[in-house]
Image (cartoon, rainbow, N blue to C red):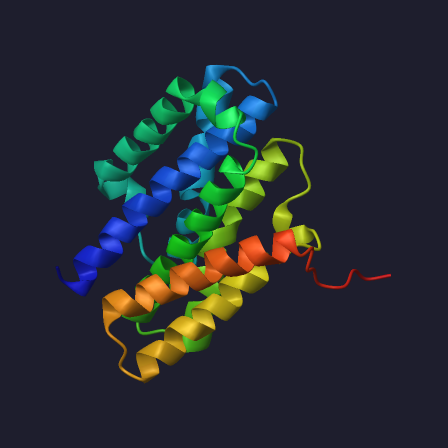
Amino acid sequence: MSTQELVYFIDLGGTLVFAISGWLAASKKQMDPFGASVIAFITAVGGGTLRDLLIGSQPVGWMVDQNYLLMIALGIGLGYLFKHYLEKLRKTMFLFDSIGIGLFTILGIEKTLSFGLTPVIAVMMGTVSAVFGGVLRDTLANEVPLIFREEIYATACLTGGILFLILGYFNVNVDVKIILTVCYIIGLRIISVRNKWSLPAIK
């Protein structure tokens, strides 16, 4: 499998898990199926859409490839069918969200670099890809977005993006580089929440 194909499947995987995350967030607010589907869609493609617009990739990815819409539909279907089961798992949405930001951080970096932009911009766009869909999800669900709370969230994406570039500098195998970065981001999120690590609030 080529690097381009791997990045593509990462994008589809991130779209799926974020769609599930959006559906679960909407179900907690007891939205109707249409409203929940809108939240799932926005959560899945919001970050990638903003990234593509900023780096000049138009039309944006989901408009030219129906596989993204299929992944969103699958995520909605899984959320609908297994809603009651998933709601019993207190950390399910947290896990899906953590997986999503890990996958989308890498995707955003790779796509930005492919447009000839600098590594610094690539890390920024990777973070935008990862967190902006969640910002829209939480805002529409009338919640304070995670990125604006004390939790380690965007910081995990930023430091994970830097790790990804450092591994690339040392010519680490692409598959290994992706696995290590995703595991780092997910691990940092889980450990920080369990240990209640947070950035200091402005007082």
Residue appearing at x 23%, y 42% in the figure: 64
Work out whether residue 55 or residue 161 is closer to the camera in this orientation and state it. 161
Residue situated furthest bottom in the rendering = 170
On the rendered structure, is 127 left or right of 111? right
**Residue 75 pos. (x, y %):** 36, 31
Of all residues shown, which one is farthest toward the top?
32
Please tell me which residue is depicted at 39% across the width and 65% down the height of the picture.
181
Q: Closest to the observer: 125 or 18?
A: 18
Residue occupying the point 25% across, 57% down: 7
Q: Residue at x 40, y 50 (%)?
A: 48
Residue 201 is left or right of residue 14, and the answer is right
Looking at the picture, does residue 67 appear above or below residue 33?
A: below
From this viewpoint, is residue 118 visible? no
Seen in the image, is 8 located left or right of residue 158? left
Q: Name which quarter of the figure residue 136 lies in.
A: top right
| Viewer-closest of 39 and 53 | 39
Q: Quadrant of the N terminus?
A: bottom left
Q: Position of residue 83 (x, y in %)?
A: 46, 21
Q: Position of residue 77 (x, y in %)?
A: 35, 23
Q: Where is residue 84 shown, x and y percent of the image?
A: 48, 19
The quadrant of the picture occupied by the C terminus is bottom right
Q: How many badges with numbers are in the image?
A: 0
Residue 34 showing in the rendered view:
yes
| Extreme residue in the right direction | 203
